Image (tube, grey):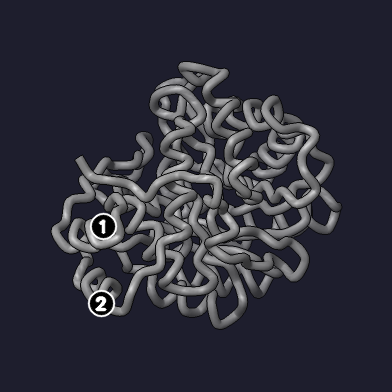
Amino acid sequence: MASTVGVGEGVHAGAAGEFVLGGDLTIRRMGYGAMQLAGPGVWGPPRDREAALAVVRRALELGVNHIDTSDYYGPHVVNGVIKEAIHPYPEDLVIVTKVGARRTPEKDWPAALKPAELVQAVHDNLDHLGLERLDVVNLRIVEEGGGLGPEDSIEEPFTALAELREQGKIRHLGVSNVTVAQFREARSIAPVVCVQNEYNVVRRDDEELLRLAAAEGIAYMSFFPLGTYTLRHEKPAGVDAKVPLATPLDNRALDLVAERHGASAYQVALAWLLHRSPNLVCIPGTSTVAHLEQNVAAASIRLTAEDLAELDTLQA
C-alpha cells in the first residue's frame, strides 16, 4: 500500500502559496472541489450527510479558503451542504461556482447555455448558497445536448453573464472547458479572472492556455487534478452527455517520486501542479475527511529538479 505524507498540526493549505483573483480576492492555491459531496454519480443527497458536513468544516480548519461548486451538482444538493456546514461564511472564503450545464432525470449533463438558463442558474446558486452576490462564476462550455463545441463562439452566453455582473449578481467571471480562442473571445467581452480546464501530470494538452493565463495574471484551476478521471474519451455528443471516465493513475515514475517523499502518487500529482506554474490552483475533490487531509498535506511537498524531470516523462 502506498504511503502518504502525514497529517500533523503543521498541515495547512497556506503551504501551497496564494493567488489573487481579479485584484481583490486572495485564495490559497490548495482549494477544495465539492462535487463529490453529492450522492453516487453526483446525484441526490450524500450517503452520509453528517460526514459531508464534516468535510466542508474540516477544509476550513485546514486553511482552505477556496471552494469550487455548482448548483447542478446533485442537482441543488451540494450548495445546500456547503451552506448548512459553514454559513455565515468566513470573510476570506471565496466560493467559485459554474453554470452552463443541467441535470436530467437520466442523470446526464446536457448543455444549459441559453441566456435564460444562465440567469436561472445564477439565481439558483445565489439562493442555495445563501448569498446576495457570487464571488466567481465560471461559464462551463458543454457540447452535449445541443451546446457549444470547440469551434463555436461563446459570445451569447458570456455576454449574459457579463450583464449579470454589471447588475451586481456576480463579482468576477471565469471560463471552463474552453479553447484558447474562446478564452480570448471571453476577455474581449468582460474581464476573466480564472480558467478551469482539464490539466494534470498525465494530461497536458492545455499547455498553451496555461501559459497564456499565467502571462495575463489569470488563475488556471485544474479540474481532475489527480489524473484519475478525464473528459477526453470517445463518446459522441448528442442527447447523452459525456461523463467523467475513470482512468487509473498507475505509473512507475510517479511511484518512484512518491517513494522518495514518503507520499502517495496522488499527493505527488497535486504537488506537481503547484510546482508547474504559479497561477495553477488545485481543487481536488473528496467525500472523506481523511482524503481531504491527505490532499492538503500535499501542499507541503517540495519536489526537486530530479523529481520534476522524471515526472516530465509522463504524458498520456
Whether 93 is drawn above or below 50: the answer is below
Whether 168 is drawn above or below 108: the answer is below
Q: Is residue 232 visible?
A: no
Residue that appears at 50% across and 42% down: 111
Residue that appears at 31% across and 63% down: 201
Distance from label 2 to label 1 (Cα)? 13 Å
Label 2 amino acid? Glu
Which quarter of the rendered picture does the N terminus lie within? top left
Residue 168 placement (x, y as % from top left)? 85, 52
Is 117 on the left-hand or right-hand side of 43?
right
Residue denoted by label 2: 306
Residue 237 placement (x, y as % from top left)? 34, 45
Residue that appears at 31% across and 53% down: 263
The foreground one among 64 and 171 is 64
User: How many marks overall?
Assistant: 2
The foreground one among 187 and 155 is 187
Residue denoted by label 1: 258
Quadrant of the image occupied by residue 42? top left
Residue that appears at 50% across and 37% down: 35
Element under disc 1: helix
The foreground one among 71 and 147 is 71
Could you classify mark 1 by the number of other residues whose Cα lies within 10 Å: few (under 14), some (14-19), or many (20 or more)? many
